[in-house]
Image (tube, rainbow, N blue to C red):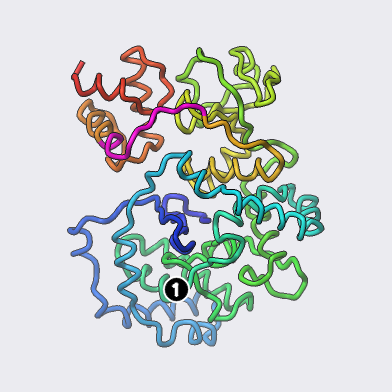
Amino acid sequence: MSTHPLTRVIRFSVLAGLCAAVLFGSASSALAQKCPGPAGFNKWLQGFKQQAIAAGVSPQTVATALNGVTYDPRVVAKDRAQGVFAQDYLTFTNRMVNKNRLASGRARLQKYAPVFKRIEQQYGVPGPVLVAYWGLETDFGAFMGNMDSIRSLATLSYDCRRPEEFREQLLDALKVLDRGDLHRSQMRGPTHGEVGQFQFQPSTYYNFAVDYDGDGRRDLVKSVPDSLASAANYIASKGWQAGQPWLEEVIVPQNLPWDQADVTIQRPRLFWSKYGVKYRNGQPVPADATPASLLLPMGRNGPAFLAYPNFINVYLDWNNSLVYSTAAGYFATRLAGAPPLRTGNPEPFSGEESKQLQRLLVQRGYDVGKVDGVIGAATRDSIRAMQLQYGLPADGYPSHALLRKLQAGG
C-alpha cells in the first residue's frame, strides 16, 4: 500500500504468476533523455548521506545502509516500462479472490482470533478488512519482494521522474533502520521500495508501525501481530468508522437515475431505497440518512454495491484503482460472511475497444486522462456525459451502443 496513491504500484509482480499493475504510465523518451545517467550517482549519494545525518539519522546507520550502494539500472528500466492496469473488475476479482485465498484468509482469522479481537477493540478495524489486504498485497506474507529496497529508493531518488517523493521515502527508510525496527538485510521488496507484509512505503512504516507483540521492535516483515496492528493503525488514521459497513452487495432495478451511480456521488440510503435497490437477500435498503454511493464496477448489468464512507475514505486512499479497491472490499465482505458475488450479465468490452472509445471522446473535447484502455474517473465522467447526450442509460460504463454512436459522429 502507499501514502502516495498516484504512484502506488499493485505489487502482484511479486506474486509468481499473478499480475503486475501500476497506476502511472511510462515516461516519454524525451524525459528519459533529460534524466541523469549513472555517472553522477556516487556524488549525489554522498550529498544525500550528509542530508540524512542533518535530518537526525545517526552516521552509523547512514554508513551501514548506504555505503557501497550502487545505481540499479533495472529499477529505472522497470519504472520506465510500467504499463497500465486494464483488467476489468470481474476478471481481476475472479483471479485474486479465489477459493484458495478465501480458505487461507479464513484460516488466519481463526489462527489469530485473539489478536484480531484486541486490534478491533483498539483501532475499530475488523479482522476481515485486514486479512483481505494481507492476502492481496503479499499472499499473507509469502511474497514480499526480493529487491534491495534501499538501493531501489536511492536509484529512484537520484532519477528525474519523482525524486522528491522517493528522497522522502529513502530518508524514512533510514529512520526505520535507525529506530531498530529492521535490519538492513530485511529491507527488501518490490521495485519501488515497499516493505513488509502489507507493503508499506517507508514513510507509512515510520509513521504508523506499532510494536504489538511487545518485543521492542516494529517488525512488519516477520511479526504478524506487528503487521496487522500497524495496518489497522494506518487504516484508523484515515477515518475508519468502527462498526460501520464498507461495501454491501445490492440488487438494482432496471430503471434508476443511472447518472447518480458513481463512487464520487453520495446519497442517503433513502434515495436508493426509493428507487427499489435491495440487498442480496431481497430485503429493501433501509430508508435512512446513511450516506452511500451506488458502485457499478461493470455498469448497470454487472455487480452492484453500496459503497460507504469507509470504502471511499479508506479503500480508495489505500489504492485509488477502483478495480483493486472494490476487489479488496468484496474480499473482506466474503471473509465476513457475505455470499459469492452475483456477476450479472455485463457487456464485454475489450481494452482495445476502450482505447478506441477514449480516442473518440478526446476528439469530442473530453478529458479522459491517458488513452490507455483504463476506465478511470475521467473516462467515466466523459462516458456519462455522452450517454446523457445520446439518451443512453448514463451508468458511466462503456458500451457498444455508445461506441457506435461516437463512430457515426452523431
Residue that mark 1 sits on: 147
Region rendered in magenta? 344-355
- Can I make out residue 288 in this image? no
Rendered image quadrant of residue 184: bottom right
Circle 1 SS class: strand
Position of the C terminus by quadrant: top left
Question: At 42% from the left edge and 50% from the top edge, which residue is drawn?
Answer: 6
Q: Left or right: 284 with respect to 38? A: right
Please tell me which residue lies in front, 83 or 172. Answer: 83
Q: Count all numbered tags in the image, as a single digit.
A: 1
| Position of residue 214 measured from the top left corner of the image (x, y, whole percent) | 77, 71
Q: Left or right: 173 with respect to 379? A: right
Q: Name which residue type carries label 1.
A: Met
Mark 1 surroundings: few (<14), some (14-19) or many (≥20) residues within 10 A: some
Rendered image quadrant of residue 347: top left
| Position of residue 29 measured from the top left corner of the image (x, y, whole percent) | 19, 59
Q: Left or right: 283 with respect to 376? A: right
Query: Magenta segment: does it hold 347?
Result: yes
Q: On screen, 377 above or below 202?
A: above
Question: At 49% from the left edge and 28% from the top edge, which residue is drawn?
Answer: 302
- Can I make out residue 381 in this image? yes
Query: Magenta segment: does it hold 65?
Result: no
Please tell me which residue lies in front, 185 or 11. Answer: 11
Question: At 45% from the left edge and 82% from the top edge, which residue is drawn?
Answer: 66
| Position of residue 35 measured from the top left corner of the image (x, y, whole percent) | 24, 66
User: Extreme front residue here?
Assistant: 99
| Position of residue 135 measured from the top left corner of the image (x, y, whole percent) | 59, 56
Q: On screen, 318 above or below 322?
A: below
